[in-house]
Image (spheres, rainbow, N blue to C red):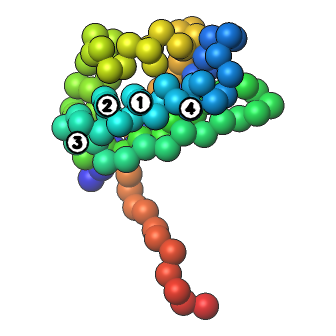
């Protein structure tokens, strides 16, 4: 059973959306995508609340936890970590029970 992590965060006020997307792009390519157990991720933005959400899927909770600990000391994640309003960050972790994909049935 895979794991879904949902991270809610705000960024420092001096960063605009495009800058943060570039920072996350580098984070995903150079940090998350090379971690054991990483499956995929997506980035969402809630305009009215000025909040970012990252949804990630991992093979196991232990691999997710290992990557979460490593993010604070890895040079490929440093710019991302420094861009966050640390008080705003919250994480939810759930086991994925079932997922569905689009079918061609009408």
Q: What whole-number distance in Å separates the C-alpha atoms at marks 2 and 1?
A: 6 Å
Comes first in the chain, label 3 or label 2:
2
Q: Nearer the viewer, residue 97 or 90?
A: 90
Residue at image point 60% right, 39% down: 44
In the rendered view, would you say 38 is above or below 72?
below
Residue at image point 25% right, 46% down: 59
Measured as percent of width and height from the top left, residue 63 is found at: 22, 34
Q: What whole-number distance in Å separates the C-alpha atoms at marks 4 and 2?
A: 14 Å
Q: What whole-number distance in Å separates the C-alpha atoms at marks 3 and 4?
A: 23 Å
For label 2, the SS is: helix
Q: Which residue corresponds to mark 2?
A: 30
Confirm or deny contact between disc 2 and disc 1 (CB under 8 A).
Answer: yes
Q: What whole-number distance in Å separates the C-alpha atoms at marks 4 and 1?
A: 9 Å
Q: Is residue 66 left or right of residue 79?
A: left
Residue at image point 23% right, 34% down: 35
Q: Which residue corresponds to mark 1?
A: 26
Q: Which residue corresponds to mark 3?
A: 37
Measured as percent of width and height from the top left, residue 57 is found at: 37, 45
């Amino acid at each position: 059973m895979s794991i879904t992590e949902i991270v809610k965060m705000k960024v420092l006020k001096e960063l605009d959306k495009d800058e943060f997307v570039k920072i996350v792009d580098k984070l995903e390519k150079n940090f998350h995508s090379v971690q054991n157990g990483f499956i995929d991720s997506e980035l969402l933005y809630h305009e009215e609340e000025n909040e970012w959400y990252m949804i990630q899927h991992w093979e196991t909770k232990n691999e997710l936890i290992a990557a979460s600990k490593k993010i604070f000391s890895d040079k490929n994640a440093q710019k991302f970590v420094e861009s966050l309003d640390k008080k705003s960050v919250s994480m939810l972790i759930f086991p994925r029970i079932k997922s569905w994909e689009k079918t061609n049935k009408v």
